[in-house]
Image (tube, rainbow, N blue to C red):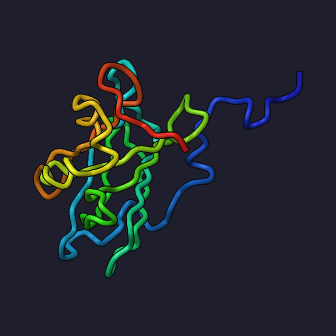
């Protein structure tokens, strides 16, 4: 039997093609207005995923590239330093996220909204379509110097993911 080709093998292959020399910072730590988005990527059994990759996008601002990428560590933790985006086009402030992980054939896209923006979140056209329990999976909790956003790939607390 011939050797399997990459589409036939189990990945991920992040260490080969996706390292990013700039690291997970959208802005340098200590930059005025910098916040940390952090959390853990968890599988359906609630176990940390040590080989996932989290990417974030947001509208770039002064001194802000708008793109961050962070692999999870052995405990499934990730952290990206950025600035909190402003509300735009009738949407609450949010950061777009994609998660790549073992067992996924494609990235899974989601969003991070901010727990200290209740009025904006209540008026957001996307969030307002979700059941409150599901909606809560998209809202990051404020914590020291940033926000906590755990990503549940499956299970009872599965994060809401969107189609491409």
Residue 85's spot in the image, x, y percent?
28, 65
Whether 115 is drawn above or below 155: the answer is below
> Which quarter of the figure has residue 156?
top left
> Residue 6 at what x, y percent from top left?
73, 37
The residue lying at 22 percent from left, 68 percent from top is 34
Quadrant containing the C terminus in the rendered view: top right
> Between residues 9 and 140, which one lies in front from this camera angle?
140
Name the residue furthest bottom.
Answer: 62
45 relative position to 18: left or right? left
- Where is residue 66 drawn, in percent x and y? 40, 68
Q: Position of residue 32 (x, y in %)?
A: 18, 76
Position of 55 with respect to 127 (left or right) is right
* Left or right, residue 100 beside residue 141: right
Q: Quadrant of residue 49?
A: top left
Quadrant of residue 136 within the rendered picture: top left
Give the position of the N terminus as an image quadrant. top right
């Amino acid at each position: 039997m011939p050797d399997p080709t990459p589409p036939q093998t189990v990945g991920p292959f992040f260490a080969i093609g996706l390292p990013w020399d700039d690291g997970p910072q959208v802005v340098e730590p200590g930059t005025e207005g910098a916040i940390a988005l952090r959390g853990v990527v968890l599988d359906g059994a609630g176990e940390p995923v040590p080989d996932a990759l989290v990417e974030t996008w947001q509208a770039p601002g002064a001194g802000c590239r708008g793109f961050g990428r962070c692999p999870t560590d052995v405990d499934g933790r990730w952290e990206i330093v950025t600035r909190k985006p402003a509300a735009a086009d009738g949407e609450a402030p949010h950061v777009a996220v994609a998660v790549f992980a073992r067992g996924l054939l494609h990235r899974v896209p989601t969003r991070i909204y901010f727990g200290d923006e209740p009025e904006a979140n209540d008026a957001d056209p996307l969030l307002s379509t979700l059941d409150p329990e599901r909606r809560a999976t998209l809202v990051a909790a404020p914590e020291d110097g940033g926000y906590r956003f755990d990503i549940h790939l499956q299970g009872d607390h599965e994060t809401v993911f969107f189609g491409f």
